[in-house]
Image (tube, coloured by chain):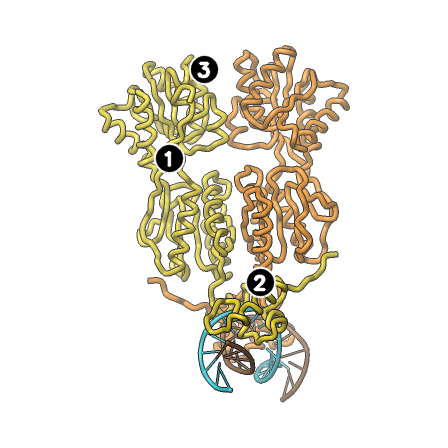
Chain colours: A yellow, B orange, C cyan, D brown
Amino acid sequence: MVEKTKPATLGDVARLAGVSIATASKALNGRAQVRESTREKVMRSAEALSFVPNPLARGLLSGTTGTVGLLTSDLEGRFSIPIMMGAEDAFGAGSTSVFLCDARGDAIREQHQVRALLSRHVDGLIVVGARPDPRPSLAGDINVPVVYAYAPSEDPDDSSVTSDNVQGGRLAAEHLLSTGRRSIGIVTGDRGYGAAHDRLAGALTALHDAGVEPVQDALFGSWSEGWGRGAARVLLEARPDLDGLICGSDQIARGAMDALRELGREIPDDVAVIGHDNWEVLAMNARPPLSTIDMNLQELGRRAAGMLFDAIGGSPTHGVEKLPCRLMVRGSTTPTS
Amino acid sequence: MVEKTKPATLGDVARLAGVSIATASKALNGRAQVRESTREKVMRSAEALSFVPNPLARGLLSGTTGTVGLLTSDLEGRFSIPIMMGAEDAFGAGSTSVFLCDARGDAIREQHQVRALLSRHVDGLIVVGARPDPRPSLAGDINVPVVYAYAPSEDPDDSSVTSDNVQGGRLAAEHLLSTGRRSIGIVTGDRGYGAAHDRLAGALTALHDAGVEPVQDALFGSWSEGWGRGAARVLLEARPDLDGLICGSDQIARGAMDALRELGREIPDDVAVIGHDNWEVLAMNARPPLSTIDMNLQELGRRAAGMLFDAIGGSPTHGVEKLPCRLMVRGSTTPTS
DNA sequence: TTGTATGCGTTATCAG
DNA sequence: CTGATAACGCATACAA
């Protein structure tokens, strides 16, 4: 049987130290009006009883709980996880705890979760989207700060942070250009995703700035290996001189690499391939390992936490902050990297 | 600007209903000693003010908070996520909220998180491991129920739930046998993982029961595509008659399939391949889609939540409960599935 | 059937 | 410098 060790209360500490509850409270909270010797006595007692202030009682009084809600619209989504990790990390370093909720992509469910969170008197809310397109702002009856991560809010007055897909696309193109490629194709994913267009725009800008045009119009499809395979075949048939391929995701890149290899092309000697996302299980196991664009999602989560923290502290930000991506150079773009 | 709508208190409800606080409390909590007409009056007032009882105040009285801690030893790990989803789902359906903590595989950090959780007076704790090998029990000064998920506790008196890897291995072998394969090879992952040995044991049992022996001793290596490729080549060279391959993970299976195809083998006609984990992004995008063993991780999370719930209710379980795996049949073992 | 009083653990305000 | 005391919002034993 487990010992039912009731946690010590402030009263216990005060009694052990031989002072009043009020004095004990002041001593532990670093209030000025208390003699140094008394403070130490109290500190020692607290230590001896391994006293921890009850956050419920504290919250009841102060109105703040030291908790925040982390509301993901889709936990399955591969992108939510690193963001959550970053946020949890940033908060855990301080002393705020994180309530996890998964709305499973359902707006009704989301409303329900928000209500539950608010009823627990969270000090703030981070809403993590499954895809980087703008999403509706949470309805107005929320009286705590909210930060939208990955999927920005449609309301420009809200506080959002997301990945800079334009810059990411530019990064990819510039890297291929820097390795001397000039016959560059672009295969990306679902036309319905803003990210697909943003990454493309960034790539096109970079190519244009270098006086290069893509071998043909970018191919839209889906975010899958299968599409990557098919698109690569089509592209190579039309343009056998292809020497560089920008893919809208690592999955697409994996598929494209398989197809290219089967068509007798060496990577990266004949064709350099770059992906997007740095999904490690895919990128690291590719042959050769896949160069790609990393969105720094964990950092994004940390940033969201920071913004929420500031907002709770009374300094909210407004609008969408875009975090830059980072180039990961591996074997698919540079020989014997 | 957001309206600072202070949430209504029980006092507000009582005043609006024209009764005392005590009566309002009884009415809302379904206590018997209150006239029906009064109860309805109170209910309506509560509705009108959209009153929600303050969980802090309630927790201060009752000692329970309606919260649990979800402590993952490694959020990166692909296996933690579905388990968390299941647990969050099961709790969210009721009215308990989940505190998320990530120990990042660090024991010190874990202790720290446990302390933080306990100081918040969680009613219970779920500890999710990164790999299915037994892990040390949390030190004894915990006065709330704990359930270990995926990685069981070393202490048989603790309450644990994990995946039945032996049964999973058996399932894989039985499936290959059922498709008529008789020259079966086995490639698995890191020798240091109990799961590798358990899955192997299950497969060997099934083969033995069918009067079949594997073409050669199982190959241990790592849980990667690269190892899958290498092992498949070695195996095929030694036993060109291979017609079935059991892989310890989907990553290994993906690698093996690539190698087999490059050596001119058709899948599944020449060689049937089965994996383990049902890691969808890998399994569904394989050519052909990969048959595999699903560990029902989400169900495992739900079960952990259920066990914790029971333990909190005073009916703890002891020992390790093993949840059966499920066979996912796809194209890599059956033509035109 | 209803209301009054008390306490949960803390912090803040005021007197001593 | 220290100590009573009143909140915070709610639930319960007890009195009316």
Do circles 1 and 3 both sit on a common chain? Answer: yes
Amino acid identity at mark 3: Glu
Find residue A219 and report its image quarter.
top left
Q: Badge 3: how crowded within 10 Å, few (<14), some, or many (20+)?
A: few
**At 68% from the left edge and 21% from the top edge, which residue is drawn?**
B218
Q: Earlier in the sequence, mark 1 or mark 3?
A: 3
Tag on residue A52?
Answer: 2
Identify the residue under disc 3.
Answer: A262
Measured along the vertical axis of the image, is residue A91 above or below residue B325? Answer: below
Amino acid identity at mark 1: Arg
Which element carries disc 1, helix, strand or loop?
strand
Tag on residue A175?
Answer: none
Q: Earlier in the sequence, mark 3 or mark 2?
A: 2
Distance from Cα at disc 1 to Cα at disc 3:
30 Å
Which quadrant is home to the C terminus of chain A?
Answer: top left
**The one of C3 and B111 positioned closer to us in this rendering:** B111
Q: Position of residue A306 (x, y in %)?
A: 40, 51
Q: Position of residue C8 (x, y in %)?
A: 61, 71
Q: Nearer the viewer, mark 3 or mark 2?
A: 2
**Residue A245 can be seen, yes or no:** yes
Which element carries disc 3, helix, strand or loop?
helix
Q: Chain of mark 1?
A: A
Q: Is residue B70 left or right of residue A136?
A: right
Tag on residue A326?
Answer: 1
Q: Chain of mark 2?
A: A
**Residue A112 can be seen, yes or no:** no
